[in-house]
Image (tube, rainbow, N blue to C red):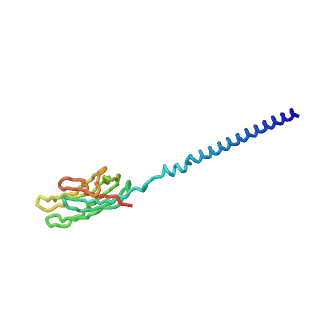
Amino acid sequence: MRRVTRIATCFGGATAGVVAVVAALALIGALSTNGAMAAGDAVPSPGATGASGGAATGDDNPPIVQWRLEVVRDGQTIDTFESATTLGQGFSATHHHEVTHRVGCKENPAGGIDLARTISISPIAADVNGVTLSIEANETIEDDTAPSTPEGCALPPQPRRVSASHPGLLIPMGEWAAWTLIDKNPTLVYRVRASVESH
């Protein structure tokens, strides 16, 4: 009887030990699962990272430059161009000025001439220091003085072509910038003003 009791006691102790081991393993598995879930929650998703770190700030649209160009000949403004042009884009326009002169000793009207002026402008930079414009000019002008015949009869002034380009004229904010195309006989200067439009 004592022997049976001892066997039962040993068997009961072994069973309790097995149960304890199984319970411990289950507890360890639960803790590992919770730890993995917590670690997964702590790592930001790729979408969240892109939303916080990759989002652009500010206005992505290129600025619009409001500019005005005055053509000044011998100190007098003779033509004006103005427009609003997006940074990186181009603007081009041609102004025509038909003139007719009286020639000869009888001052008869001569054939007319088109004093055309073509201006091409592109804003290439804009910041707190000012606006930079690329400018191309092609125009026909007349000399200040008209020739005459040996008898003293009037001849029309000689036209001439003027072609010039400026790769980057910097116009400070709130100020005028000047670009001299011809320095004498006649003087020809472009005065330019530019600013960035507020959105």
Q: Which percent across, then down, holds residue 118?
A: 30, 58
Q: Nearer the viewer, residue 142 or 76?
A: 76
Q: Nearer the viewer, residue 160 or 54?
A: 54
For the point 26% across and 64% down, the residue is: 97
Residue 33 versus residue 73 in the image, above or below? above
Please give left or right for residue 152 compared with residue 94 in the image: left
For the point 78% across and 36% down, the residue is: 13
Which quadrant is the C terminus positioned in? bottom left
Q: Quadrant of residue 34?
A: top right
**View extreme (right): residue:** 1
For the point 22% across and 56% down, the residue is: 188
Q: Which percent across, then down, holds residue 6?
A: 83, 34
Please give left or right for residue 188 compared with residue 153 in the image: right
**View extreme (top): residue:** 3
Q: Quadrant of residue 30?
A: top right
Please give left or right for residue 119 compared with residue 11 in the image: left
For the point 31% across and 54% down, the residue is: 130
Number of marks in picture: 0
Q: Which percent across, then down, holds residue 111?
A: 23, 64
**View extreme (front): residue:** 2
Residue 107 versus residue 181 in the image, above or below? below
Q: Nearer the viewer, residue 43 or 155?
A: 43
Which quadrant is the N terminus positioned in? top right
